[in-house]
Image: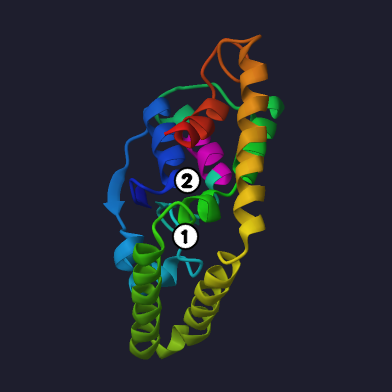
Amino acid sequence: MQLYHHPCSLNSQKVRLALEEKGVDYTSFHVNPILGKNMDSSFFRMNTSAKLPVFKNGSHIIFDTIETILYIERIAVVSVGNDSFSNQEVIEWMQKIQQWNPKYFTLLHIPDKHRLYVSKFIRKVVIARMAESPDLASAYHSKLREAYETEEKLKNADLVKRSTESLVQLLDEVERKLNDTTYIVGDEFTMADATFVPVLA
């Protein structure tokens, strides 16, 4: 089993925490999105969204964070005899936590000079990869359009306000829950906690 990830990726942290908690062995491959490594054709063929993490078990490839964590739970039952599965309440909390998208919140807290430099560099990488792999041109073109759209969205002051409000609302809701329980769902650490801990980091 292989995990393609980056330590600064929030979703990568969630999946890595789930793997460690469940005691599932895996091979780690660092893919640095700041250097555009997620745009390399070998990775892009596997995942044209270029998002991290990607979990691969043989020919089975998963990009969705919650789906990956639930898959890890199933693997743990077979490989390490861990028989705890996430119940519906845990899954609902995972989905609630996952609804907050850290992308714009994070980007808006990076100094403009650095953010614009990286954005311009990534666009150059995408154009270069498009030339190298013409069969992936349409997928690369989508990523290029997405990069320009992201820059436009970052000019919207209301966007950061909504993202911040969404995060505060999530933190308040978790805090209320933790007033009654040791962990998010009861007195045992669950995958809801594994999904939430990186948000605090």
Task: Please tell me how crowded label 2 is: few (under 14), some (14-19), or many (20+) other residues with Cα within 10 Å.
Answer: many
Mark 1 and mark 2 lie on one chain; the one further toward the N terminus is 2
Nearest the camera: 81 or 162? 162
Residue 153 located left or right of residue 8: right
Q: x, y (%) of residue 121?
A: 33, 75
Please report contact status of discs 1 and 2: CB closer than 8 Å, yes or no. Answer: yes
Residue 51 circle label: 1
**In the rendered structure, does residue 160 fall within the stretch colored magenta?**
no
Q: Is residue 111 above or below residue 8?
A: below
Residue at the spot x=66%, y=18% of the render? 177
Query: Tag 1, which secondary structure?
Result: loop
Residue at the spot x=42%, y=90% of the render? 134
Q: Quadrant of the C terminus?
A: top left
Residue at the spot x=57%, y=29% of the render? 192
Residues shaded magenta: 66-75
Residue for badge 2: 11
